[in-house]
Image (cartoon, rainbow, N blue to C red):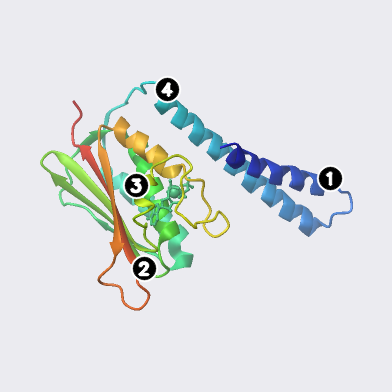
Amino acid sequence: MNHELRTPLTIMKLAILMLKQAEQPAASRAKYLDILEQKCFKEIALIEDLLALKQFETQQVPISLLQINLKHLIQDLALDFEQTWADKGLTLKVDLPNPLSALETDGSSLNRILLELLTNAGKYSASGTAVVLDVSLVAGYFVLTVSNFGRGISAADLPHIFEKFRRGIGITGQAIPGTGLGLTLVKYLVQHLNGSIDVDSRPSESSEGDQLWLTSFTLTLPQVQG
Ligand SMILES: Nc1ncnc2c1ncn2[C@@H]1O[C@H](COP(=O)(O)OP(=O)(O)OP(=O)(O)O)[C@@H](O)[C@H]1O
Ligand SMILES: [Mg+2]
């Protein structure tokens, strides 16, 4: 953990040192300011994630329940992701039941869970593939599945991916940015919503040429709490 917290700070210190050199040309100053901004946001996000995890680990977090509009929540997320993913040629296919029954849950926790799962789907997908978010209602439970085609999760990694700071074997921060906290937070948030989450990753039968893996996270949430 010390390493993850210190790395952005070390880079920020270097950027400040460079900026203090009077003879820096304007273009270099702009570059160092960008680095400073980026690493500062990263450090804030990291500290916020750690504080959220600490809260879940050490105390009972009260759940704030509301009837939420799942369709709107997903549409807002989809709009953001479609833009972010355009460069990589990724598309998002959303499959919702029609009509969509009401869901009583903590909307901000659910939003964060889907944000982490879709961010991962985007990061670990092969270019030009489709990410699918499928929603169904089965016996009083909402079942939300996020699936993507890409490098997949090896059998060796699979039992560990929800652990704190755990990234897939061989995945480096330089190749694919990340700290390994996303799914730990997801695990706690799912418990918070009295739900469960499962993951499956296996070679895809439909992909040709480069063998892609189909990875699916299945989130099950009670339609009504209590
Ligand atoms: N859809 C996916 N496809 C392939 N591997 C995945 C997928 N989702 C998660 N993983 C694996 O699980 C690991 C843990 O995921 P997690 O979201 O906790 O961390 P991260 O994405 O590496 O970093 P961050 O803290 O920024 O989310 C990842 O490093 C990756 O190896
Ligand atoms: Mg992640």
> In the image as oriented, which residue stretches furthest toward the front?
156
Question: Between disc 3 and disc 2, whose residue precedes?
Answer: 2
Q: Are marks 3 and 4 in contact (CB under 8 Å)?
A: no
Specify whether tag 2 is near ligand 1 (CB below 8 Å): no
Q: Vertical placement of 57 versus 49: above or below?
A: above
Quick one: label 1 or label 4, which is nearer the N terminus?
1
Mark closer to the observer (1, 3): 3
Dot 2: within a 10 Å radius of its alpha carbon, few (fewer than 14), some, or many (20 or more) residues? some
Which amino acid, mark 1?
Lys
**C-alpha gap between disc 4 and disc 2:** 40 Å
Ranked by sequence position, the earlier of labels 1 and 2 is: 1
Q: Residues within 10 Å of mark 3 (few under 14, many from 20)?
A: few
Real-space Cα separation, disc 3 to disc 4, in angstroms: 24 Å
Give the residue pinned by disc 2: 129
User: In the image, is 89 to the left or to the right of 34?
Assistant: left
The CA distance from mark 1 to mark 2 is 45 Å
Which of the marked residues, 3 or 4, is nearer the chain's N terminus? 4
Res 84 visible = yes
Residue 115 placed where, x, y %?
A: 39, 46
Q: Give the residue displayed 70% in from the left and 46% down from the top.
A: 11
Question: Of helix, strand and loop, which one carries label 4?
Answer: helix
> Label for residue 20?
1
Identify the residue position indicated by label 3 in the image.
Answer: 159
Res 58 label: 4
Badge 3 marks a residue whose secondary structure is helix
Which is closer to the viewer, label 1 or label 4?
A: 4
In the image, which is nearer the foreground, mark 3 or mark 2?
Answer: 3
